[in-house]
Image: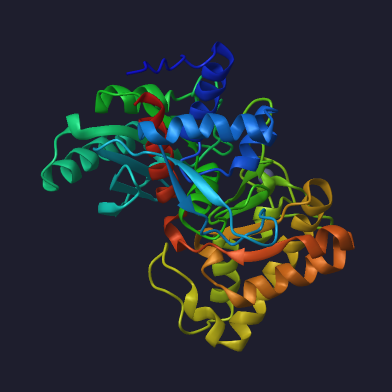
Amino acid sequence: MGLTVLSAPSARRQRSRQQLLEIIRSHPGGVTRSYLSALTGLSRSAVAEGVQDLLPGGLVVEQREHGRGLNRSRGRPSSLLVPAAPSGAVVGIDLGHTHISVALARTDGELLAEQRESFDVDNRAEAAVDDAARLVETLVTHSGLTMADVLGVAAGIPCPLDPVSGRTRPLGDHPTWSDFDVREELSRRLGRQVRVANDAEMGAHGERRFGAARGCRDFLYVKASHGLGAGLVLNGEVYRGATGAAGEIGHIQLPGAQGLCRCGNRGCLETVVSIDALRHQLEELHLPGLPSSSNGPLTSLGANPVAARIVTEGGRVLGHVLADLCNCLNPAAIVIGGELGTAGQPLLEGVRESIHHYALSASAHAVDIRTAQLGLRSELMGAVSQAIEHALIQA
Ligand SMILES: [Zn+2]
């Protein structure tokens, strides 16, 4: 009987395989072969060869692409290469200005439990972190798990932070958040490394993995809430800027606006368009049907024509600023989340009108304006997606 000798893969092939595995693991939502080729500079055949090596080992699985097709070529749908999920759970934390939300999910993204409570996060950083840790432990225990089952934790926070040091840099007068090492504080309380990012960035991750930006490599997620911030995804990667302060669109100056902003300047976008500015205008007109909760969705506003008109005008002002961003970045989509995003159609109408009016036609026609598919949970689900990525990288 003849003897078959299988030669070991060459060193080059092993390096390619490792490089591809690392990229796939850092994209829990999946990547296409052509994206891998573009990102690594490897030829299509080298990528195909590397993927062929990875699939039988079970480290990577292949799925049909289910996104909206913004970055797909026409014709046959391509398949996505997704990192295989280790068995265990992950935790996502969303610290908003006035709430704390916590979610427990499986490593494939399926939600196991979730809890949200009101909390004065802006003025009580240490207490907010204490409370978040307590909520996590309660959720894990009530789900019949222990912290040893938790493979990754990520948290979104309501202010800019230095991506290297993890220290926060609040814009307004929030002394408890000034130079606060939120990553270290959360990690110490939970007994494991916690991945931390600005909430608008988390919103972008959430909509990209689970919501309105699936399959999209160039888009902006706008968190329109008490303030306005944007998560920028450019060429498939989050862009944070030199010091983590990119995307603070709430502080872009509006010509003629004079309102004093929490940043100390006058005439910033968020003095005119924010959930608080909108509520103020609606209350001045004593409009009925306002949600009683200070953080509730605004879905009912469209039913009142006067309220809808105010929301649309807010959308026009926001759209004017977003038109400049379209000229600068040429995104394929803008996803509007936060409480303002839940106002839906009247808001989108105003934003679209301004973008078509003020952006160059090539950019205006390229961009699709939509509201967040995850409603008020984009940031929380983004934290879940980052916790999954963290778990996969450590696997
Ligand atoms: Zn400002």
Apparent side of residue 88 relative to residue 210 in the rendered image (left or right)? left
Quadrant of the rendering where the N terminus is positioned: top left
> Which residue lies at the image location 54% right of the left edge and 72% below the top edge?
343
Q: Which residue lies furthest to the front in this view?
A: 1
Camera-side residue of 300 and 348? 348
Residue 138 picture location, percent across and down: 16, 43
**Residue found at x 56% / y 19%:** 13
Number of dots carrying numbers: 0
Q: Which residue is drawn at 74% across and 69% down?
A: 352
Work out which residue is located at the far top of the displayed protein and give it.
11
Q: Could one spot residue 197 in this view of the protein?
A: yes
Quadrant hosting residue 194: top left
Which quarter of the figure is the C terminus placed in? top left
Residue 357 in the image, given as x and y percentages of width and height: 86, 68
Nearer the observer, 203 or 61: 61
In x, y percent, where is residue 283? 54, 75
Location of residue 301 with respect to 180 vertically, above or below: below
Q: From this view, report whether residue 68 is shown above or below residue 23.
A: below
Q: How is the image coloured?
A: rainbow
The reply to whether residue 26 is visible in this rendering is: no
The quadrant where ligand 1 appears is top right
From this view, report whether residue 167 is shown above or below residue 293.
above
Foreground residue among 218 and 348:
218
Front one among 65 and 142: 65
Image coordinates for residue 387, horizontal then vertical, percent: 38, 37
Looking at the image, residue 301 sits to the left or right of residue 258; the answer is: left
